[in-house]
Amino acid sequence: MNKFTCAIMVGAVLSISAPAYAESRAVNISIGSIGGSLDNAALRTIRQVIGFAVASGTVDKFIVYSPRNGSPIPIEGGLSACAEAGFGITNTRFNAFIQQLGSIKPQPGTFFNVELTASCQLK
């Protein structure tokens, strides 16, 4: 009876924590101009942080939505993309990647958004 109770408790904990784990395994990233010139230094920093995350295995899937071949390219430049956590990467490591992105503060006139999502989707 005691082993059965432990199994039920473990199953309940896993069923509660699994959806929370799945909810924050990817981030949508967008940077662009509000009308003036784009902060190219911030864009380079974002690309470097993402590149390091891909190289270190923190990010397995990286999809660029814009600029993309065959779709409109904003005159000012920018980036719209999604980065998904690598297989077997802990939430702590992926959250550190998200915090790195969040620490980037572009100049006025440039917007930068990082939004959690369940997974990256092809558009």
Image: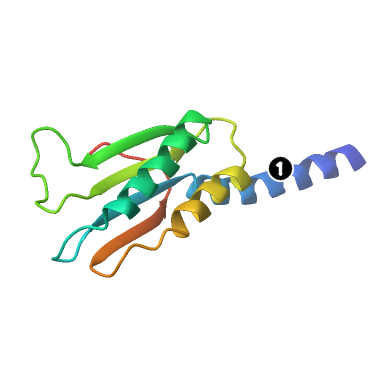
Please tell me in which quadrant of the rendered image residue 69 appears.
top left
Q: With 63 as the anchor, is 76 left or right in this view?
A: left
Specify the farthest residue to the front: 41
Residue sitting at x 60%, y 43%: 93
Residue that mark 1 sits on = 11
Q: Where does residue 14 sit, x and y in percent of width and height?
A: 67, 44
In the image shown, does 12 or 27 lie closer to the viewer? 27
Please tell me in which quadrant of the rendered image residue 37 appears. bottom left
Question: Is 122 above or below relative to 24?
Answer: above
Residue 33 percent across, percent down from the top left: 19, 61
Q: What residue lies at 34% left-to-right and 50% top-to-bottom?
A: 29
The spot of residue 43 in percent (x, y) is 31, 50
| Number of dots carrying numbers | 1
> What kind of residue is marked 1?
Gly
In the depicted view, which residue is nearer to us: 87 or 5? 87
Q: Is residue 1 visible?
A: no
Q: Quadrant of residue 90?
A: top right
**Is label 1 in a helix, a strand or a loop?**
helix
Q: On the rendered image, what quadrant is the N terminus found in?
A: top right
Residue 9 in view, yes or no? yes
State the residue at coordinates (34%, 54%): 42
- Residue at the image position 31 percent from the left and 66 percent from the top: 107
Identify the image quadrant of the C terminus.
top left
**Depicted 99 relative to depicted 7: above or below:** below
Query: Compared to 68, does 28 lie above or below?
Result: below
Residue 15 horizontal side relative to residue 52, left or right: right
> In this view, which residue lies farthest toward the right?
2
Depth order, front residue of 19/11: 19
Relative image position of residue 44 (x, y in whole percent): 33, 46
Colour scheme: rainbow
Task: Estimate how packed mark 1 is, as few (under 14), some (14 to 19) or many (20 or more) residues with alpha carbons within 10 Å.
Answer: few
Left or right, residue 68 beside residue 106: left
